[in-house]
Amino acid sequence: MTDRYRAASCQGPYGGENGFDDCGDPVRFEVARHLREPLRVCPVHLGPSLLLAEGVLWPPRITLVR
């Protein structure tokens, strides 16, 4: 795990785009999005981010960050 991800916090179910703050849990997954930065989320918010975040590719491209 790199220092970049070790310090990263989950971007919550929507990536902070809908006024919600980060959840604070460590990042475990990165979800690719169209014309946006990848969404970094914890296991709890992986499912909601796939369904509700803006620009998520379909089929989804998910990378394990650890």
Image (cartoon, rainbow, N blue to C red):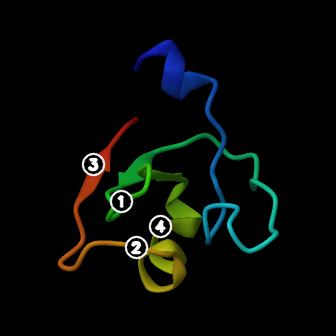
Q: Position of residue 63 (x, y in %)?
A: 27, 48
Q: Gap in Å between the C-alphas at discs 4 and 3?
A: 11 Å
Q: Position of residue 18 (x, y in %)?
A: 73, 74
Q: Position of residue 19 (x, y in %)?
A: 82, 69
Amino acid type indicated by mark 1: Leu
Q: Nearer the viewer, mark 1 or mark 3?
A: 1
x 68%, y 67%: residue: 17
Asked whether, in this view, residue 49 is left or right of residue 23, the answer is left
Contact, mark 1 vs mark 4 (Cβ under 8 Å) = no
* Mark 4 lies on residue: 46
Amino acid type indicated by mark 4: Leu
Q: Nearer the viewer, mark 1 or mark 2?
A: 1
Contact, mark 1 vs mark 2 (Cβ under 8 Å) = yes
Secondary structure of residue under mark 4: helix
Residue 55, numbered label: 2
Amino acid type indicated by mark 2: Gly
Residue 63, numbered label: 3
Q: Residues within 10 Å of mark 3 (few under 14, many from 20)?
A: few
x 51%, y 27%: residue: 5
Amino acid type indicated by mark 3: Thr
Secondary structure of residue under mark 1: loop
